[in-house]
Image: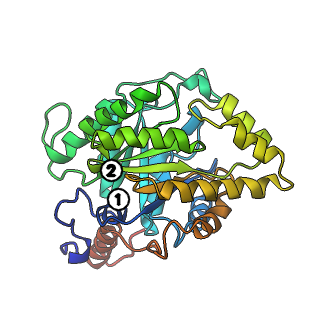
Amino acid sequence: MNEIKEEWAIPPGHSSHGRLERVLRRGEFAITAELNPPDSANPEDVYERAAIFDDWVDAINATDGSGANCHMSSVAICALLTRMGYAPVMQISCRDHNRIAIQGNVLGAAAMGVSNIMCLTGDGVQAGDQPGAKPVFDLDCMSLLETIRSMRDEKKFLSGRKITSPPQVFLGAAINPFAPPYDFRPQRLAKKIEAGAQFVQSQYCFDMDILNEYMKQVRDMGLHEKCYILIGAGPLASAKTARWIRTNVPGIHIPDSIIDRLEGAKDQKLEGKKICIEMMQAVREVEGVSGIHVMAYRQEEFVAEIVEESGVLKGRKPWLREPNPGEHAVVERMEELTQITGQETT
């Protein structure tokens, strides 16, 4: 097979060929977004949802049973996204997979061209709609980071067995500066960086005072120079929705002032978008923040509008879909097999 073209080679000092890592290492402000996974086996459902983000985000998160609810799997969504030239972030939840399955999925994802992996412990099964499921938790987010870093850098499985072609991936983790104990959160980030995290994405930010205090501690510890920090943002549909989220979704902090503002608005959905835009603009100015992770659950159609109106990209346009090395290699291999067999390979 032909060698991977030079423009898809891993640049010096990078861990992957992925566009998200390239954007961040160039010092550009990055935008990522979360794809709402379908309850469907139709690939068009994924493509339609991903197309909303075209030209507006640098990478798309494929969630892994978020909220302990079943949807199309993260690895399958990533397979579909890489096939179309998108840059996915594959989330891995330790709740549902043991170490054997995880290591196999990492190799498979990297072979498909997935360059970004986010390591999560995962919500407990009691949070979802199938509380009778048996949780795994063979690893947690820290040991998962260490496992994948070892696979990449030391070219070996946890068993010590050699890996012939290691996964070339950019490692991420989640943070939540907005949940007590607040003073512990920077220490937690430091531990994740030590375990292997190269970028982190936070829970929703609705309180700039808490974020500013968190980032002050992060800067004092020099952590912003060791890891790229993307802060979560997203529109709230209504005051009722905000109250429900605050009560039922662990770890999300929504101040009374935000709910009161939504309550008093003539058009609560529009006001939720305005709040999100204002938050993004404020986050953009915080020293040490490298990007924003947009989570617009059931409002994905507003992502382009929110990003554009916020001006956080300052004129930069994230790349359109483009072929990746995994996709390129698969196409070449299929062409080879066609030549050998004289038949089309499906």
> Residue 255, percent across and down?
66, 36
Residue type at mark 1?
A: Met
> Residue 277, percent across and down?
62, 59
Is residue 224 placed above or below 342 in the rendered structure? above
For the residues labelled 2 and 1, say whether their Cβ atoms are less than 8 Å apart: yes
Where does label 1 land, which residue?
112
> Residue 174, percent across and down?
43, 40
**Dot label at residue 108:** 2
Find residue 59 and report its image quarter.
Answer: bottom left
Residue drawn at x 51%, y 21% as measured from the top left: 134
Mark 2–mark 1 Cα distance, whole angstroms, equals 6 Å
Is residue 267 placed above or below 343 in the rendered structure? above
Residue drawn at x 19%, y 37% as measured from the top left: 157
Find residue 322 and report its image quarter.
Answer: bottom left
Name the residue nearer the viewer: 283 or 325. Answer: 283
Residue drawn at x 59%, y 65% as measured from the top left: 310
Give neighbour class at mark 2: few <14, some 14-19, many 20+ (Cα, 10 Å).
some
Residue type at mark 2?
A: Gly
Give neighbour class at mark 1: few <14, some 14-19, many 20+ (Cα, 10 Å).
many
Q: Is residue 182 left or right of residue 256?
A: left
Quadrant in which the C terminus appears: bottom left
Could you tell me which secondary element the residue under label 1 belongs to?
loop
